[in-house]
Image (cartoon, rainbow, N blue to C red):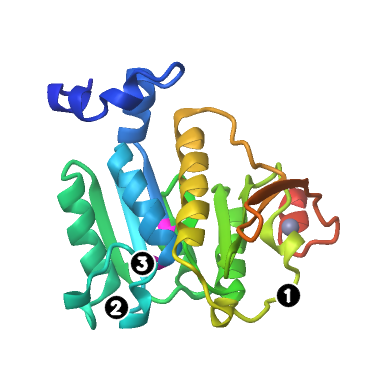
Amino acid sequence: MLEQNELIRYNRQLIIPNFGEEGQRKLKDSHIIIVGIGGLGCASATYLTAAGVGHITIVDFDTVELSDLNRQILYWEDEIGDRKVVVAQRKLSKLNPSVEITPIFAKITNENVLGIIDRSQVVVDGLDNSATRLVVNSACIKQNIPYIYGGVSRLRGMITTIIPGQTPCLACLLPESVEGLGGLGVLGVTPALIANLQALEVIKLLIGHSPSLAGKLLIFNGDDIKFRVYEIRRNENCPVCSQALHL
Ligand SMILES: [Zn+2]
């Protein structure tokens, strides 16, 4: 049951056809995890908290720097030097106190990743390097947890929804780790846009609707403001998801 204040808080989404109180209750009962709370993670965490996802775990090992403030909208100038997960938890909890926010101050590694993503229904990508993304991807395939990949560089971004056992995984697309693209620069609007598409895919998955980008790669180019969507195929020799299929 939703309480009276929830009926008011979420009124504008409750009245959307095929969402309703049932959808809201599903969001309330959900637990997701956002790995990396930088440009992408700040935006997806803000909108998923506002939407009423019941439990959100946020993971990051960084502290706030002045050069983050052009795009990492949960952090303000007087918080430079503070741990991002601590600041983010405080702001998100003020936005929506009924959402449980669990901060984990940690760098994701092969050793700790399974413990970190355990018991979450969806993993949301907020990372800035492909090496860690591939670690998360493998863990999600092993644990059978959907993983919403998002990546940005300059005015470009991309996103795909990885459903273990159904779609290609990130290792099918990025067979080897490549250097982080953060050095190429990024405008704040690009991660905000990609993160909100990720958040929309998360909400669809949580309320039982079909995700729109499963098996598809959406590429956004801000130079001409075009969205292109490509079908993607599983690499039959993928060391991560083809093995999982044979288990
Ligand atoms: Zn694969």
Main secondary structure type of the part rendered in magenta: loop
**Region rendered in magenta:** 34-38
- Circle 1 — which element? loop
Q: Name which residue type carries label 2.
A: Val
Mark 2 Cα shell of 10 Å, populated few (<14), some (14-19), many (≥20): many
Q: Separation of disc 1 and disc 2 at Cα?
A: 29 Å
Foreground mark, 1 or 3, reads 3
In the rendered image, the vertical position of residue 44 relative to residue 185, given as above or below: above
Mark 1 or 2, nearer chain start = 2
Find disc 1 in the rendering and name its residue. Answer: 176
Can residue 54 be seen at all in this image of the molecule? no
Of the pair 192 and 99, the residue shown nearer to us: 192
* Quarter of the render that holds ligand 1: bottom right
The image shows residue 67 at horizontal and vertical percentages of 37, 81
In the rendered image, the vertical position of residue 42 relative to residue 179, given as above or below: above
Q: Are marks 3 and 2 in contact (CB under 8 Å)?
A: yes
